Image (cartoon, rainbow, N blue to C red):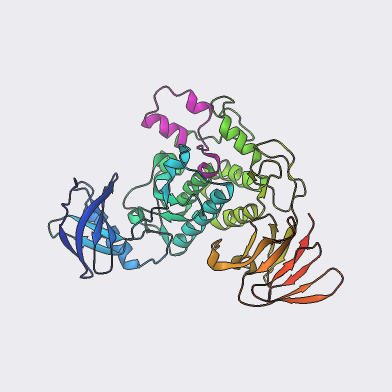
Amino acid sequence: MSGMLDSGTRLTADSGLGVEVFDLLGAGGQGEVYRVRTAAGDQALKWYYPACATREQEDIVRQLVDRGFDDDRFLWPRDFVGDGRGGFGYLMDIRPDRFKGLPLLFRRKLRTTIRALLTACLYTVEAYQALHSRGIAYRDISWGNLLFDPTTGEVLVCDNDNAVVEGDSTGISGTMAFMAPELVRGEPGVSPGTQSDLHSLSVLLFMLLMNHHPLMGRRELAIRCFDEAAERKLYGKDPLFLFDPLDRSNAPDPVEHATVLATWAVVPDSLRDLFTRNFTRGLHDPAGRVRESQWRDALRAVLDAVVDCAHCGKQNMTEPRSASPGSCWSCGNALVLPPRLVLTTPPPRTEHHIMLHRSSRVQAHHLAPEPARHDYGDGTLVAQLTEHPQRPGKFGLANRSGSAWTGTRADGSTQEIAPGQTVPLRSGLELDFGGARAVVRAR
């Protein structure tokens, strides 16, 4: 092992927990990360390079540890560790192997799906919304600080030692390509906070869905030396959205930017409208940026409206509640909309449209008018579309919850659907989930 700390080095955390270093996991711009043994099990220790181990950074880490932000979407600093000679770091959970870095995604080294990417976007928005609700600004939202599971879309936010209490101007301002334009320009009196985080978040969402930066079009191709001065002009002094409807001078090049052109064409209008607002008005007016709640609602609706192409099987985004699905992005054939479940929550009433494709699921968050968190995992499963074992092509909705539903058929007859039972899927079927109500519609 070659690093600042030798294998076998013993340290003590502020809590009194003993720490033994035994493996170097990796290194970054601020320090190295080690696997360490503790009485509480193996953990990860981030240890700062001497140049980064400043008193200011130490104060930030101690404050973050003291806040005790307990959220499984963050590799949050859990305990401060010092060596008594000015060196220090912090303990955090170890990243599970299934979580991958976004550079692998952007280089097309990961296999994933549209549903997983949309889920990752939704989970990312809610993770930062949870942080902001605690009065904490992250300040360095970027592709380098997010990990995701390409199968499920679950996310992990790392490098949380950049976060500070809203209004604190200490520390870094972010990664240039993700920084809000006013920060790139260095405007007097402007410091990173939740408003600048909203810009960074929108850039990250655009890159997750488009695999391209929202400000890198023809202007970027004309730059001969992409140095700091060029970055400041592109991202701060003169930023212009690729798809600005009023100024096409930075539009994508049809050859060099063919991928983002094709992807933008198949993204639903509800998402395109938010991106356009954020990267036109929001570039110049921080108050005009898209809020987390707006991203959350739009992403959830589009995720529930994803359909599989009947010809090639590829997943396609469709506009929620639209009766015109368009064509498959992969094979070009017309998409066929499956039946949908129109679900209405208890007051304050919210209506969800869930496309009933082969892998459709109703989750607990669908039944709540204002869920604190969306979760598409098995632990929150309420209902699942299943195919009849003896009659291929015939589907039903299986009760995966712990309580009975009431079903009302189109002819007015009713039945109870106990946990584990399945009700045949028919147009006009009404379901009472015990507060939330739903109806199956043919299209």
Q: Is residue 290 visible?
A: no
Left or right, 340 with reference to 149: right
Give the x, y percent position of residue 279: 55, 41
**Of the pair 295 and 399, the residue shown nearer to us:** 399
- The residue positioned 49% from the left and 45% from the top of the image is 204
Left or right, 102 with reference to 6: right
- The residue positioned 46% from the left and 33% from the top of the image is 234
Q: Is residue 185 magenta?
A: no
Give the x, y percent position of residue 138: 40, 54
Q: Is residue 218 magenta?
A: yes
Q: How many marks?
A: 0
Residue ranking furthest to the left? 85
**Of the pair 425 and 145, the residue shown nearer to us:** 425
**Of the pair 28 and 110, the residue shown nearer to us:** 110
In the depicted structure, whether residue 85 falls above or below residue 363: above
- The residue positioned 22% from the left and 52% from the top of the image is 54
Give the x, y percent position of residue 154: 48, 56
> Looking at the rendering, which quadrant does residue 359 occupy?
bottom right
Give the x, y percent position of residue 186: 39, 41
- The residue positioned 38% from the left and 30% from the top of the image is 229
Viewport quadrant of the C terminus: bottom right
> Looking at the rendering, which quadrant does residue 231 occupy?
top left
Q: Which residues are magenta?
A: 207-235
Residue ranking furthest to the right? 411
Q: Is residue 145 visible?
A: yes
**Of the pair 40 and 14, the residue shown nearer to us:** 40
Left or right, 335 with reference to 317: right
